[in-house]
Amino acid sequence: MTEKETLLSIEDLRLYFRTTQGIVQAVDSVDLKLGVNEAMVILGESGCGKTSLSRAVLRLLPNNVDTYSGSIYLEGENTMEMADEAFRRQIRWFKMSLVPQAAMNALNPVLKVGDQVAEPLIVHHRAEKEDARNQAAWMFEKVGVPVDFLDRYAFELSGGMRQRVALAMALITLPPLVFLDEPTSALDVLTQANIFNVLKEIKQELAVSFILITHDIATSSELADRVAVMYAGQIVEVNTARSFFTDPLHPYAKLLMASVPKLKVEQEPTFITGQPPSLINPPSGCRFADRCPSAFDRCSEEPPVFLVDGQQVRCWLYRAKGVRA
Amino acid sequence: MTLELNGQPSNDIPAELSGTQQFRSDGPTSAATSQDVLLSVQDLHVWFELKRWGFLNAGHVRAVDGVSFDLHHGEAIGIVGESGCGKTTLMKTILGLYQPVQGNVKFDSQDLSELTTRDMQTYRSKVGYVQQDPYGALPPFMTVERILSEPMIVSGIKNRSVQSQRIHDVLTEVKMTPVDDFLTKFPHMLSGGQQQRIVIARAMILKPQLIVADEPVSMLDASVRVEILRLLQKLQASHNLSVIYITHDLSTVRYFSDRIFVMYAGKLIERADVNALLRTPLHPYTQALLAATPDPDYRNALTHKELPPGEPPSLVNPPEGCRFHPRCPKRIEGLCEVEVPPDFEPVPNHYTACWLLR
Ligand SMILES: Nc1ncnc2c1ncn2[C@@H]1O[C@H](COP(=O)(O)OP(=O)(O)OP(=O)(O)O)[C@@H](O)[C@H]1O
Ligand SMILES: Nc1ncnc2c1ncn2[C@@H]1O[C@H](COP(=O)(O)OP(=O)(O)OP(=O)(O)O)[C@@H](O)[C@H]1O
Ligand code: SF4
Ligand SMILES: [Mg+2]
Ligand SMILES: [Mg+2]
């Protein structure tokens, strides 16, 4: 695979929330790089911080933020240094957009879906209504929604169609980067497969980059160029799709892959005992240590990120094989 | 909107049903006379009445429309199908919660429609139900202990020490140990996987012969799913339980059932042993489902999938003939859109309702 030009580079990103029980370290020291026209999958179990990570990058923050720090370089510019107003006018929708988790249920029930899709263009690009509608029609075609659905309301559409509408909305301003938060989790297998066909086409035709957030490992392979695995607020592995899906590095990633039931090959799935730690006062060493079959004494210390053949892994087992990042 | 659904399926047999063709059952091997059969479902139709303006009949949702099968003692079957195809309705009818407009459900050769209210209660204690949506399944203000005693109180097990012994046994079986740590917990204090184990414990508490598990793991993370399914499998083996496992996910069924039934738009369109169904799927819909279900493989990103167009049909006005025909790449013009395909058995014990196998 050829080295792609960097589009997004995240360094030491943290997002902590204040709660009555304590500080929730939802995103903790995350480093990630994404190339132009690349699709990265962020895999992880419920509550590990995937949605929080996308919110941190898009600066869609709740009001109980405790810590929000780090750098986010987008096309070379550190957006963390931008004022909110500038971020809103230059970045969100223009450079990055989001299909939020459960987007298909969040469409406005009293607006025609065509108008909803056209809206970001009118609001953010100050486009003429007519042009915006035409662009929406074009986008409907791209995501596979019949153009005469422009005048329908969300409740008249099936779940799959609504999800495509949400996708059209995120793409309408043609941003170079789109976040997809669990885009197909609530949908049927055939609908899922259809939407992934659409995403592949769009990636090719519009040269978009995607960050796909999901806990569905098998489906994630439908789009992934690279895979990042998140565990308890941290990224524990970043790998190419090719090596990840054949031979992941991190012990957690290995167990996660082994837990996926396979349809076409005979291989009994296994499971991971125990539960992820709380994000309030997480353990000081490796966060996976108490579930890890390979844990040894060193693991009570926080592992740094090691580079193994250019891929990132946060695990002491690679202290000899890799170099510290 | 002017359409309104009433919560209960309609009881009177609509005129449209009379004169419909006879649906075939399992053929010679079927018959609830067989010693081995625990549950027998014959030509079951469950329809919901659609109301306009709250009272005018606006047709029926034919959620289950001609389903027949036998379930044997100690057997696990998986029912696979897309959202809205009628899986939950079929299960609730088997549980006696819905009445069919036609056809019947027999448990140990007893027709459910002939049971008295008291017999019905006894019947329900023989069938454990793991309902869809684990997060809504447990009453939030009850402790684990209370949740597990309820079914026993309802069915007349009043002795406290018998109750607590049973709770202890069941919690141990679902690996919620040390038991005392969990008894006083409320559902929100438990992880999704633990909640689901409590749901299973509750289904097991009256020592059922049959467990119906409706999407027991679809809300859970991959790493926990297999653990819960293994648990069900273990319980099945150790108590010689029959299990009906409902899911939309073909890849888990493979490891946790003996037979797979594929449901489409209210009908079972294919039934076979797991391996036969996965190796040689006969129905074009099953073939599409198999093709669309990915295994984790980086090559998936490099290929475009061939898929049938469109979406499952309305169950109010389902397509004539084969209900899959509008989406079917192999349909036979002049036949598939005209006549309902019966169950064919091209290979012994492999049934499919598709004209290609005629
Ligand atoms: N506004 C908030 N205030 C406090 N805690 C929060 C807030 N938002 C999220 N969290 C917590 O942060 C952690 C990460 O949540 P997040 O939604 O990012 O997880 P996720 O990986 O997207 O999970 P899922 O797969 O269930 O969507 C969780 O423990 C969650 O409870
Ligand atoms: N109480 C009801 N009243 C009216 N219609 C109903 C009722 N329950 C279900 N239906 C309809 O019957 C059809 C089958 O629903 P059912 O819940 O059995 O499907 P399912 O296969 O379990 O779907 P899912 O995978 O989404 O759980 C659907 O069209 C549904 O809208
Ligand atoms: S009966 Fe005809 S339309 Fe239906 S699945 Fe078979 S070939 Fe296709
Ligand atoms: Mg999330
Ligand atoms: Mg259901």
Image (cartoon, coloured by chain):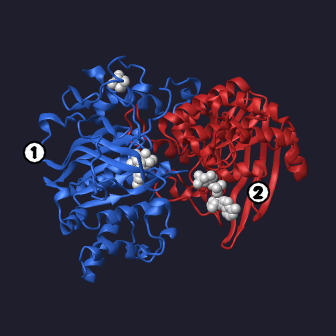
Tell me the mark number nearer the camera, choosing from 2 and 1.
1
Residue that mark 2 sits on:
A61
Is residue A261 rendered to the left or right of residue B97? Answer: right
* Beta carbon at label 1 within 8 Å of ligand 2: no
Relative to A292, residue A23 above or below = below
Q: Quadrant of residue B250?
A: top left
Residue A215, percent from left and from top? 56, 46
**Chain A: what color?**
red
Q: Nearer the viewer, residue B249 or B105?
A: B105
Q: Residue at x 90, y 51 (%)?
A: A85
The circle on residue A32 is none
The Cα–Cα distance between marks 2 and 1, rounded to whole angstroms, is: 63 Å
Residue B319, percent from left and from top? 39, 31
Task: Kindly identify the amino acid type of the residue bearing the numbered disc 1.
Answer: Ser
Q: Residue at x 79, y 51 (%)?
A: A59
Task: Kindly identify the amino acid type of the residue bearing the numbered disc 2.
Answer: Leu
Residue B184, percent from left and from top? 44, 77
Residue that mark 1 sits on:
B34
